[in-house]
Image (spheres, rainbow, N blue to C red):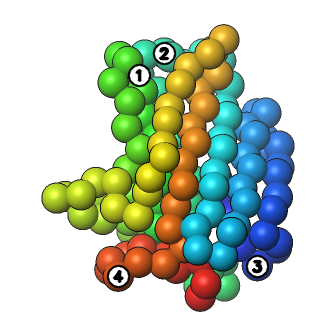
């Protein structure tokens, strides 16, 4: 999922395969809630990602938030996706720019909620105010 914040401050969309995403941009941070059905996927080893990018700049260097459920161990982390690789934005602080995060699996649906700062001093972190 790649989101353009130029659309509006508050939005919700149901995408292909019934993936639901909603967000609310408060000016300082943005609250996200994403739910994806896990049909045909092992619920104990599942992930979803939200990518943020100025769509006018092509598909390279996408700032992403990856939400994981790994046998009940959950994580929400900041990544930089460059072409065919994904790297943590900060190995010393994998959740840099994120807070109030949660990952859950209910009725074969993976849900991830998190608060993402709109701008921080971190190379590769897409500033929503750009």
- Pick whichever, 13 or 82, lies toward us: 13
**Label 2 to label 4: alpha-carbon separation:** 37 Å
Of circles 4 and 3, the one toward us is 4
Dot 3, crowdedness within 10 Å: few (<14), some or many (≥20)?
few
In the image, which is nearer the foreground, mark 3 or mark 1? 3
Question: Mark 2 packing: few (<14 Cα in 10 Å), some, or many (20+)?
Answer: few
Q: Is residue 6 left or right of residue 83?
A: right
Mark 4: secondary structure: loop
* Picture layout, residue 114 above or below residue 46: below
Mark 4 or mark 1, earlier in chain: 1
Question: Residue beneath label 1, please?
Answer: 45
Name the residue carrying label 2: 42
Residue under pointer 4:
121
Q: CA distance from mark 4 to mark 1?
A: 32 Å
Picture residue at 42% right of the left edge, 27% below the top: 69
Q: Which residue does the numbered mark 3 point to in the structure image?
A: 6
Where residue 122 sits: x, y (%)? 33, 77
């Amino acid at each position: 999922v790649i989101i353009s914040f130029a659309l509006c401050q508050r939005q919700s969309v149901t995408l292909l395969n019934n993936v639901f995403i909603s967000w609310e941009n408060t000016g300082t941070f943005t609250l996200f809630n994403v739910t994806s059905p896990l049909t045909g996927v092992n619920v104990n080893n599942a992930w979803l990602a939200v990518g943020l990018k100025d769509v006018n700049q092509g598909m390279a260097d996408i700032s992403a938030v990856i939400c994981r459920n790994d046998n009940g161990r959950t994580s929400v982390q900041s990544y930089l996706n460059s072409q065919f690789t994904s790297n943590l934005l900060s190995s010393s602080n994998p959740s840099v720019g994120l807070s109030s995060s949660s990952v859950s699996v209910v009725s074969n649906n993976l849900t991830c909620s998190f608060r993402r700062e709109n701008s921080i001093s971190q190379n590769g972190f897409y500033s929503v105010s750009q």
